[in-house]
Image (cartoon, rainbow, N blue to C red):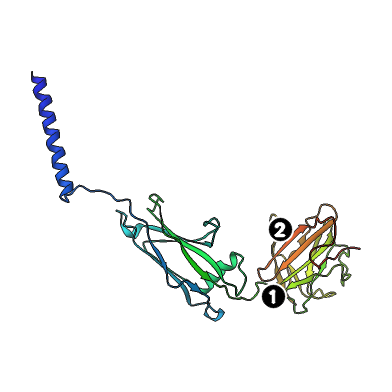
Amino acid sequence: MKHIQKLWFFLLAAGLLFTACKKNIEGGGEIAVFSNGKQPVISASAATIAPAAADSNNVALTLNWTNPEYSIDSNSVKYIVEIDSTNRNFSKSVTRTVTGTRRISMLAKELNSILLGFGFAFNTAYDIDVRVISSFPNNNERLVSNTLKLRVTPYKIPPRVPLPTSGRLFLVGDASDGGWNNPVPVPTQEFSRLDETTFAGIFNLKAGSYLILPINGDWGQKYALTNNGVPGIANGGNFVYYGPGVGGGDNFPSPAAAPGLYKIVVDFQAGRFTVTPFTQQHGLPGSLFLVGGA
């Protein structure tokens, strides 16, 4: 009998506790209910952005977003802003991370650098997507905002590497048919100009190294590498200009273990070069910069 009385007493106490808690919650009492937050909404200062080069140090874009209203201190909320070319689903996005603030501003030169990094051409309008992802500091409770679509136009900037004042470019080195003899034979070891800032040529390369010269027969200036020991540099990378009276610079290593045709593209705008095997077996090349050791 005593056991039955204890059981009834326990059930009665539990019922009273449940009722009290329910009333406390409904009445806005002290029991805390933690919120997972809500999706932030992002907005931009402009939908179309086309700054001039003269405005490179001015703010070109300001992004704001609403409070996701997490139950934690708003000063500790992390936000990741993502920017990408439209229709890529942010697969190659550029990100900016801030904490405790719901606003970022970008100078024209910062935005322009991002756009050029996407491969956008100068003075051409493109669409980009922008969104923000909020989260706790440990990346939990991630909330993705709406996606903004902006129309942007990158402005032209000076090439990273000075162009040859001669308007011409030559290949010299023991990786080439002409060896280190300077001047080099032309047109077999001269590049063709594809556009204002890009040169290219198809050369017969073998094991060894080479340099790129702006003036045939002149060792006083050259295009070379700062370090030819960088892994993969034989296939492409950054290059620099060494002007008159400036020493140093490493040769370009040839990627060829055995003699063969290679296409070399020199992009002064980006300050990069690429070397790829030329494998076309039939017909004429699609471009007219073919040279070789005929």
Give coordinates of residue 150: x percent, y percent: 49, 68
Answer with left or right where residue 229 lies relative to residue 48: right
Give coordinates of residue 138: x percent, y percent: 40, 50
Quadrant of the rendered image containing residue 236: bottom right
Assign the C terminus to one quadrant of the image: bottom right
Give coordinates of residue 153: x percent, y percent: 56, 73
202 is higher (above) or lower (below) than 195: above
46 is higher (above) or lower (below) than 6: below
Residue carrying label 1 = 162
Instruction: Indicate the secondary structure of the residue bearing disc 1.
Output: loop
Residue density around tag 2, few if under 14, some if 14–19, many if 20 or more, within 10 Å: many
Q: Sequence-wise, which precedes: disc 2 or disc 1?
A: 1
Q: What residue type is labelled 2?
A: Ile
Give coordinates of residue 126: x percent, y percent: 56, 68
Q: Residue 233 carries which label?
A: 2
Q: Which amino acid does label 1 sit on?
A: Pro
Q: Residue at x 55, y 79 (%)?
A: 52
Residue farthest to the right, as pictured: 294
Assign the N terminus to one quadrant of the image: top left
